[in-house]
Image (spheres, rainbow, N blue to C red):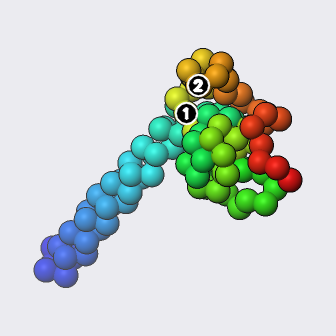
Amino acid sequence: MTYQTKTISGVAVVSAFAAALSIVAFAAPAAAEDEQEKCYGVAKAGENDCAAGPGTTCAGTSKIDYQGNSWKLVPKGSCETMELPDGRNGSPTALERDRPPA
């Protein structure tokens, strides 16, 4: 085996190792996302993850606390049981309550 063959083999091993690490790095966030769900009406103003209704763009654009048409990712199974002020509950679908004036 020549020096060049050893170098190519070493590069191949390092490349394979790097590829394996990148697969693990991308798989971890996907698993975390599987353990969360969208929950409407639970975010404080400006702290929503997305979908803040007409007149807004996305993350961080809700106008009022617990805006019914904005969602936040929460641990799976906790959306409708979260304790919120004034007897409010979260919902897996958009709510009509607590929306800014049109």
Tell me the residue that label 1 is attached to. Answer: 74
Q: Nearer the viewer, mark 2 or mark 1?
A: 2
Above or below residue 99? Residue 34 is: above
Residue name at image x 33 percent, y 54 percent? 21
Above or below residue 8? Residue 24 is: above
Report the front residue among 13 and 31: 31
Q: Quick one: quadrant of the N terminus?
A: bottom left
Residue name at image x 15 percent, y 79 percent? 2
Question: Looking at the picture, how far across and down is residue 62, in whole percent?
Answer: 66, 51
Report the front residue among 2 and 87: 87
Q: Amino acid at mark 2?
A: Leu
Position of residue 23 in the picture relative to residue 21 (left or right) = right
Position of residue 8 in the picture relative to residue 102 (left or right) = left
Count of numbered badges drawn on the protein: 2
Q: Please tell me how crowded label 1 is: few (under 14), some (14-19), or many (20+) other residues with Cα within 10 Å.
A: some
Of mark 2 and mark 1, the one earlier in the sequence is 1
Residue name at image x 26 percent, y 63 percent? 13
Question: Looking at the picture, how far across and down is residue 80, in whole percent?
Answer: 65, 21
Element under label 2?
loop
Question: Looking at the picture, how far across and down is residue 73, in whole percent?
Answer: 57, 39
For the question of whether residue 48 can be seen, the reply is no
What distance separates the C-alpha of mark 2 from that of mark 1?
13 Å
Q: Please tell me how crowded label 2 is: few (under 14), some (14-19), or many (20+) other residues with Cα within 10 Å.
A: few
Residue name at image x 46 percent, y 45 percent? 29
Element under label 1?
strand
The disc at residue 101 is none
Tell me the residue that label 2 is attached to. Answer: 84
